[in-house]
Image: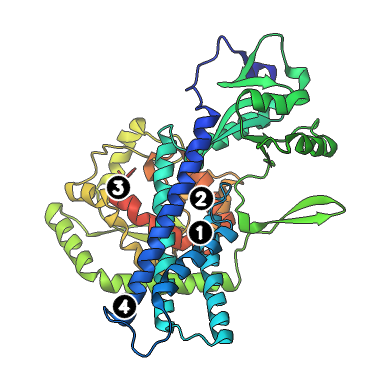
Amino acid sequence: MTSALLTPASTSSTSTAPRPARTVRADERAYIHTLVVLDTAILAVAVLVGYVTRFGDHEPRGSEVPYVLVAPGLVIAWLLSLRMLRCYDDRVLGYGADEYRRVTSASLRLAATIAITGYIADVGVSRGFLAITLAVGTLGLLVTRFAARKRLHLARCKGGGWSRRVLAVGDTPHVLELVHTLRREPYAGYQVVGACIPDALLAPVPQRLGDVPVVGSFRGIPEAAEAIGADTVAITTSSELTATRLRRLGWQLEGTGIDLVLAPALTDVAGPRIHTRPVAGLPLIHVEAPEFRGARKLIKGLVDRSLSLLALALLAPVLALIALAIRLDNPGPVLFRQVRVGQGGQEFGVFKFRTMVVDADAMLAELTARNESDGLLFKMRDDPRVTRVGRLLRKWSLDELPQLANVLIGHMSLVGPRPPLPSEVARYDGDVARRLLVKPGMTGLWQVSGRSDLSWEDGIRLDLYYVENWSLAADLTILWKTFGAVVRSRGAY
């Protein structure tokens, strides 16, 4: 069965030629240099804003502090703090939240150092000037890093930009799984350009795993990485890759500039739940259990209800206008109440603005053959049951605003898995049923990742990832990304 996955190189499909390693390294250096320039500009602007806000266009009276020296000194100290906290480390740039955490930590440590030094040395630098400068600078750094990352992601998705060239090493099924996982998120910047598999699977003629060339066996991993210009060796699961063999491989890669990473068969688990504990010389990976109750859940519920109440109050005029438009466009009720399944399998009525004709359910049987979904959902891009106003509401997700009442009641959360229908839940298997361990949400990872454009498998994967790894910080990030997804109206129909 394994050999069937291997195809001769001459008969496999040809993928886009990978970019040369020299070009990739040049792109990496250019990106880091750009970040340094942007950070310097942001910090200079922050110092200027802090000075002008605190003192206006006049010199501070009675001050012995030479702000003409303090300003550039503060910028230099801030850049050094960013450097010391490794905010320009290529291993954290462009993916994940660690880059933002390091930038924030560097700014906070600088603030603490200035406060302590100023107190000890009794230096009379204006606290208002420092507070404004540090606040504006930290926010500016985070926004600039976000914008730079989005530009980098766009370039990577188009086949350009700085990406790591990966040599995947392991058994055939695990290498294929790694390739599939990395290609699912091309913006992460990991491009598999070759593979090394066990000796027993090699054939006299060159082989490929899909469109990834097999460039060697476990005997010559460093040579294979150098031959294809890889800068990262990713080790997947294999019984032949013993601890001794991996340790020797690490020694062989020393001084080559090639990174060694391990890709365990532990997927869709967020970093905060993973802790490495050295025990008897073994780096044991400890995975914390998902949190489905407790103080954090209580806080999440309070935040949900507070924000939903505030949103309902602010959006009351908008809700009234939408209700009027629905009533004038098509006869029937303004609101549509549908039975959905919530946390623990409890059914509840979800509220939505009506976007279809009144007898839409009766017409469903006639449209079943035109279903565009690959799973349990019914999806149809040009559904004839949708009204004119309904199409506009769906495009901008305005039909879901009444669900704020469900959040206020406690049936739903602002962020969570999509609320399923009872007919869907009846066909759930054991894995998919884990979606019911938390409250469904008005928005979620599925909302910010493509909505109806997602396959059933991808939608379920994202929902399960959220269930296992939710956090208040992630909720705020998803809510922020939801605005962008709604404005782009991607996958909304």
Q: Residues within 10 Å of mark 3 (few under 14, many from 20)?
A: few
Pinpoint residue 156: horizontal percent, then vertical percent.
44, 37
Nearest to viewer (mark 3 / mark 2): 3
Disc 3 and disc 1: Cα gap in Å? 25 Å
Disc 3 and disc 2: Cα gap in Å? 21 Å
User: Is residue 357 at all visible to an observer of this figure?
Assistant: no
Counting residues from the N terminus, which is met first, the one under dot 1 or under dot 2?
A: 1
Circle 2 is placed at which residue position?
Answer: 463
- SS of the residue under disc 2: helix
Nearest to viewer (mark 4 / mark 1): 4
Counting residues from the N terminus, which is met first, the one under dot 2 or under dot 4?
A: 4
Circle 1 is placed at which residue position?
Answer: 100
- SS of the residue under disc 1: helix
Q: What amino acid type is highlighted by mark number 3? A: Arg
Q: What amino acid type is highlighted by mark number 2? A: Asp
Viewer-side residue, 356 vs 398: 398
Circle 3 is placed at which residue position?
Answer: 488
Circle 4 is placed at which residue position?
Answer: 53
Counting residues from the N terminus, which is met first, the one under dot 3 or under dot 4?
A: 4
Pinpoint residue 300: horizontal percent, then vertical percent.
50, 69
Q: Residue at x 49, y 36 (%)?
A: 26
- SS of the residue under disc 4: helix
Figure check: 208 above or below 277: above
Q: What amino acid type is highlighted by mark number 1? A: Tyr
Nearest to viewer (mark 2 / mark 4): 4
Q: Residues within 10 Å of mark 1 (few under 14, many from 20)?
A: some
Viewer-side residue, 334 vs 242: 242
Q: Is residue 141 left or right of residue 195?
A: left
Q: What amino acid type is highlighted by mark number 4? A: Thr
